[in-house]
Image: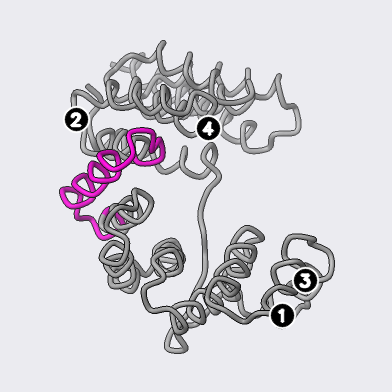
Amino acid sequence: MVHYVTFSRYLLVFALVSAGCGIHGGGAAAVKNPLSKLSKGSGFAATLESSDERLKAALAQLAFTPTAQAHRQVALEYRRLRVLDHAQEHFAAAVKLDPRDAVSRAGMARIWRDWGFPNKALPEARRAVANAPGSATAANTLGTVFQALGNFDEAKRWYGRAVALDAGAWYALNNLCYLEIMTRQPYAIAMCERAVSAAPDSAIARNNMALAHAASGDLDGARTWFRRATNTATADYNYGIVMMSERKYRDAQDAFRSALLADPDSTLAAVRARQARLAADAEEQSRDRH
């Protein structure tokens, strides 16, 4: 089993390099919104409003019938386009018109959570679950908020609730898989297998399977699953990170070189290959002196 401190070093790298996910947004006036300048000051949102057909249609419907449902649809389109301050405004407008709108409350919770304010997300996520007790999506969202707050037991309980409500909720299974990796559960691989079975085409589920194998010490299995998850360059880069964490610096160097062969323009792989080579040289020199 990989030590927790060692494993955590590359867990965050995968989140950035492989998963490529993350939402940043705001809502209340008391908190500065990092997207406000982009969406309002630069004309970015205005450009999208004239060029994106789905957003144009949602805005037209809102202008014709300003209902909670119309605001919610506009919010969903803005969220898809990553203009999250506008998404938050329209979710809030929907909730004002329909306080029991669980989808909009969950949407607001997700934006607060991913923007780094899980404490502000929690009340909205709780209301979403209260208003829609049969919604697997709402239960899963509450689980992610608890995970962001560091309350893993509650997170696991709500992910389990989501799966109980919808056996095909692969996103909740995937979250359970990732949580079990983080907490070094010996049955993480089994849970990750369920997530992959539920979403066989999901790169995120496959990457988590690779992480589960790495955490269990099965490095060959980790490499296999990384390659099933994504292109060769990214897979070899991720495997190199695992080897660096394991202090297998020559293996890491080889993996980063393979990533460079697959993608010669990858400056990140080049930097990592150099770091691995220097670390391997230093380790060998130290060993020779002793």
Expressed as whole percent of the image width and height from the top left, the position of residue 65 reads: 65, 79
Kindly give the residue lying farthest to the left in the view shown.
153
Question: Left or right: where does residue 240 sit relative to residue 193?
Answer: right
Residue ID for mark 2:
185
Q: Is disc 2 placed on a helix, strand or loop?
A: loop
Residue ID for mark 3:
49
Expressed as whole percent of the image width and height from the top left, the position of residue 118 reads: 33, 66
Q: Nearer the viewer, mark 1 or mark 2?
A: 1
Residue ID for mark 4:
275
For label 3, the crowd category at 10 Å Cα-Cα, with few meaning under 14, some 14 to 19 and many 20 or more, is some
Among the two numbered marks 3 and 2 on one chain, the one whose residue lies closer to the N terminus? 3
In this rendered view, identify the residue nearer to me: 21 or 280: 21
Q: Is disc 3 placed on a helix, strand or loop?
A: helix
Q: Quadrant of the C terminus?
A: top left
Indicate the quadrant where residue 193 lies. top left
Specify the label residue 107 is tagged with. Answer: none
Q: Nearer the viewer, mark 3 or mark 2?
A: 3
The answer to if 72 sits in the magenta stretch is: no
Q: Nearer the viewer, mark 3 or mark 1?
A: 1
Q: Which residues are magenta?
A: 147-172
The residue located at (74%, 60%) in the rendering is: 54
Residue ID for mark 1:
64
Kindly give the residue lying farthest to the front in the view shown.
65
How far apart are labels 4 and 2 at the CA level?
31 Å
